[in-house]
Amino acid sequence: MRRVTYSRNFTISLSRTCRCYCKYCAFATHLAHLRTPDEVEQLLDDAEKRRAKELLILTGEAPDENPKVMAQLNQLGHKDFVDYVVWVCERALERGILPHTNLGVMEQADMERLREVNASQGLMLESISERLMETVHAGSPTKHPKERLRTIELAGQLKVPYTTGILVGIGETPEERIASLRAIADLHQQYGHIQEVILQNFVPHPRYHGQDVGEIASDAADDLWRTGLAPGGASPDDARLPDWACSVSIDDMKELVLATRAMMPDVGIQIPPNLADWWPELVEAGATDLGGLSANGDHISPEHPFPSPNQVRERLSEDNIALAERLCVYPQYTNPQWLAPAVMDTITQRFWSFIPRGERRRVQRPELAEATYVSEAIAAAGEGEALTEEQLTALFSESRDELIEELRSAADTLREELVGDDVSFVVNRNINFTNICTVGCAFCGFGQSRRSPDAYEADEASFREKIAEAVEFGATELCMQGGIHPDYELADYGNWLAIAKDAAPQLHLHAYSPMEVANMVDRSGRSPQEVFAYLKELGLGSTPGTAAEVLDDNVRGRISPNKLPAARWIEIVEAAHAAGIPTTSTVMFGHIEEPWELARHMRVLRELQERSLASAPAAITEFVPLSFIPYQTLLGRTHGIAEITREENLKQTAVFRLALGRTVPNVQASWVKMGLGAATEALRWGVNDLGGTLMEESISRAAGSLHGSRLDPVDLVAAGHAAGRPVYQRDTLYTARLAEYPLPAAVRAA
């Protein structure tokens, strides 16, 4: 699934006084205008209430050239306008809001001052065409392309994450548009500082003499966000275009999106979603960002409010595209090389999850990264030894190619020792009997409130019909889970088991996560042991070890505060083992967790398994790593978390195998999460099982997975054979081989 990003920002028009006389601009004034400190503080309070992460500071260019503005600044104790902007940025950082400033053409000393308190800065190139200095930019010497390019280059020299772009429709030719993009691309190639390019179409505006553009913009945004009804806006082909302007078509804009992508493949392409209805088509063409969906509107085009994030998300969902927040500084620049300490500290404290996973490096002792230390830990794990949390932390943190190959080889060797080369799978069906859930996990796209139009509850007839389909398909297992329904009692869960056993007594019933069982315990007042005895009597054969996420309450408190704590999860699983009910085990990784939190999770699982193997009639049969799917989840939408890469997924899978040693012989790849191709490759990284056919998978699909919800046995057999391994169909508990699929002779010969 594709992601399109936006910034949750709030705009302050600090001063509209400007030295330029651009023909298209309705924002600037040549009268004295300056927001007072009290007004700024009130606006910042409003930004904080609206949960803005970015403060967009808009100003006219060099307002302190106006004597009255300069006199006001001096009265406030500021030597110039930039000094006042720095003060505003400091007040924003104190509130945990990241400043992005757009002050026009600048000198080095001013840009350096702003860099200390800015997460990013920006300046529109607008156009490379010098002809426009005689038309739209007449009387505006700092709109000369050389002046604009000088400022953009200065940002590169000072390592300032930068936003620029072109204004389309102000009288330039198609060739000049491409030349403008080429000029930006050349500077980016030299300095690497352009984080995004804005492709903005010109729209005519009325004049706002005597009016506050901020109030107009805020009122328009309030109306749109509240009602969903946009005011009538100007069309890109509006007949009121000035003589110096030129019309812009959707095809023109698509060409520019494609050209930008070709010239700058690593740069974001921003298109404003409030200036034309064509923005979904430009997203489809390759635009990656919608800019700041400002809660108080667009102060440059105040009569054209930005749609709300929810409105945009609903529209994008029609095209199967996810919307996710970003910071005003793009992820690749969130490090001390590009950001001043005050800004970096704010991101680390407030927005740590937006830092790319491999760059977070919060607290880790230097010796854990030494190659000798890592190699020794890998060797010990390959022998099945239990690693310390520190050793596991080192393995989960590893990024060096040669050591990752050592990890892969050790995990694959351990897999071969424990279970041989044969690849297994199970023919099963998932049934999620309800998605109504009261827990509200931030990582989940499946659970719905009872009032949601997407909420459902299965009835007995449809439930039996799905079981009949599973039997016809050749399934040997039925996997049953649902949301935590507010009305479900123990008898309701028991009833689903009874229906399933009546409909197909031959099916193994693999049902109810520890979270569901904990709910049964709480609602019934019975002990976990009594609940499992009741469920077992009704046909429960095994329990999935889901709801584990990461067994560290620090993590759980951030992603699922209403879920059972780690100790309760362990209690429920051990009660299942004591009742003679086997379980699986899982981890959900690739979100906000740290390497040492994964290390703790794996230590907890291994120690639990060792206790069960020593004293219980049942234990964990398999371990299933579940990589986080961010697209349609609250956590993915609001924390900047991208889907984990295939390479990282495979490396972590190898570490999971090594962390368990000889305690859990079977490690499964989730093809739903990582895709069948990556799951096939995982057979070289310690995996021996490809999971089930599923027939119906709702939880990952609801989170945005595009890897399907059903496979036929032939697909799983082909995947195993593609890895050069024989395959067999197993039962749920790995106790029987139900069908054998040896390697074809041609593959064996190869």
Image (cartoon, rainbow, N blue to C red):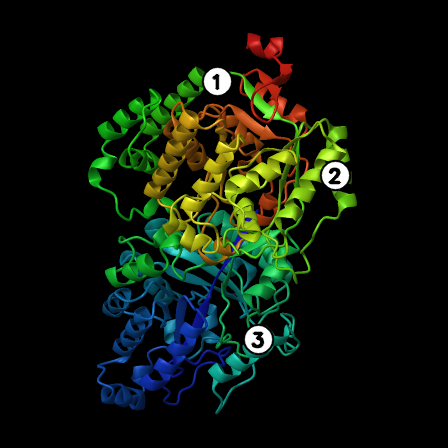
Residue 466 image label: 2
Label 2 crowd bin: few (<14), some (14–19), many (20+), radius 10 Å? some
Considering only vertical position in the picture, is 236 above or below 643? below
Q: Residue type at mark 3: give it.
A: His
Separation of disc 1 and disc 3 at Cα? 63 Å
Q: Amino acid at mark 2?
A: Lys
Q: Is residue 626 left or right of residue 195?
A: right
Of the numbered discs 1 and 3, the one sitting upstream in the chain is 3
Is the C-beta separation of discs 1 and 3 under 8 Å?
Answer: no
Q: How many marks?
A: 3
Q: Is residue 670 above or below residue 312?
A: above
Mark 3: secondary structure: loop
Residue 105, image x and y in percent? 34, 70
At x 45%, y 51%, the residue is 641
Q: Which residue is mark 3?
A: 304
Q: Is residue 593 left or right of residue 475?
A: left
Question: Which residue, given by chain and number where applicable, does mark 1 sit on?
Answer: 419
Which label number is shown at residue 501?
Answer: none
Answer with left or right where residue 729 lies relative to residue 335: right
Residue 684 sits above or below residue 219 on the image: above
Could you tell which of marks 2 and 1 lies nearer the N-terminus? Answer: 1
Quadrant into which the C terminus falls: top right
Give, as a three-letter code, the residue at label 1: Val
For marks 3 and 2, give the CA distance: 50 Å
Above/below status of 257 relative to 718 = below
Q: Residues within 10 Å of mark 1 (few under 14, many from 20)?
A: some
Question: In the rendered structure, which disc, 3 or 2, sits on the residue that comes first in sequence?
Answer: 3
| Residue toward you, 268 or 429 | 429
